[in-house]
Amino acid sequence: MNIRATDYVLEIGSGNNPRPRSDVLCDNSIDDDAERGGPIVTDRPIVEADAECLPFRDSSFDYVISAQVLEHADDPERMIRELMRVAARGYIETPSEIAERLYGWPFHRSVINVVNGTLVIRRKNFVSQFGELFHVLGARDPAFKRFHLTHHRLFLVQYEWDGRIDYEIVPEDAAPIDLKSTDGIETLWRELARTRWRDRWMPVAKGLVPRGIAAWGKSSLARWRPRPKRDLREIVVCPRCRGPVVWRAEMVTCARCAVDYPIVGGIPRLLPP
């Protein structure tokens, strides 16, 4: 990710594994760990909010990270517009179509590919024919886990944007990548063959670090890294109307909508009613 030293960075769907470089965290489920790998991390400013109606002023951030979130969105186009509204640049990461067909996460709503530099998004209309098989292999089989990590470009969509996100919403029966054609497979192979040695093996090296130690290291980096002196209260708006809000001891209030958003454990819960 091309994040500059002075960038003010928002991370959407930060969950239990936020990036050390993120200055503000945002997650739509503070209390429910069902769809993440552990308890939520709250080691820096964080809000509970929906990525499709972010509670921030226009252009509040220089860079926004959205990793493993867009495929969950009810309205991915609306979420994309929100990302472009609040930040000038950013990074989007999702499972690839190959990953969706192998792993078959039932709570993912869209399938996403990158075709000629454009995000191609369609409603997911299939389930994995392999059930939990590849989830078990990924968790228990070191050889398969190593293959997944060294060939991560097969399983991930990684898209960095500057200024605007090029995207296309296509019908759910479209086939942006034809896995049954020789040309389609050759295209995937050429992409994989261009992967640098460092990019191929770095995920394996990271995977050797125990999860607890990795989490401690990331949290320590985030805690000690100098951050821009910005007050979260200066950029938060009502997620419903984008109007100004008033901060109180236990709630954030939008007078225009006559809505109170609670503050629980120091975290503003800015989900629209």
Image: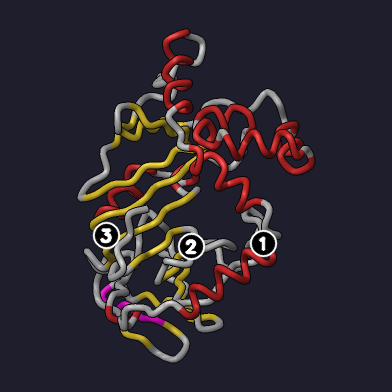
Q: What residue type is labelled 3?
A: Ala
Point out the tag, 1 or 3, that comes first from the N-terminus.
1
Residue 172 in the figure: left or right of residue 242: right
Near-viewer residue (25 or 198): 198
Q: Which of marks 2 and 1 is nearer the N terminus?
A: 2
Residue 111 % position (x, y): 47, 33
- Mark sitting on residue 38: 1
Instruction: Between residue 151 and residue 252, name the one nearer to us.
Output: 151
Residue 181 magenta-highlighted:
no
Where is residue 96 drawn, in percent x and y? 50, 33
198 horizontally vs 62: left or right? right
Amino acid on which the number 2 mark rests in the picture: Arg
In the rendering, which numbered label is found on residue 142? Answer: none
Q: Which of marks 3 and 2 is nearer the N terminus?
A: 2
Give the residue displayed 52% in from the left and 30% down from the top. 154
- Dot label at residue 87: 3
Q: Residue furthest front?
A: 197
The residues tagged by marks 3 and 2 sit, at their Cα atoms, a distance apart of 17 Å
Residue at 46% across / 37% down in the picture?
Answer: 196
The vertical placement of 26 against 140, above or below, is below
Gap in Å between the C-alphas at discs 1 and 3? 28 Å
Judged from the image, the secondary structure of the residue bearing numbered disc 3 is strand
Residue 159 in percent (x, y) is at 37, 42
How many neighbours does mark 3 have within 10 angstroms: few (below 14), some (14-19), or many (20 or more)?
many
Position of residue 142 relative to residue 129, above or below, is: below
Q: Distance between the residues labelled 2 and 1?
A: 15 Å
Q: Is residue 198 above or below residue 24?
A: above
Image position of 52 with respect to 23: above or below: above
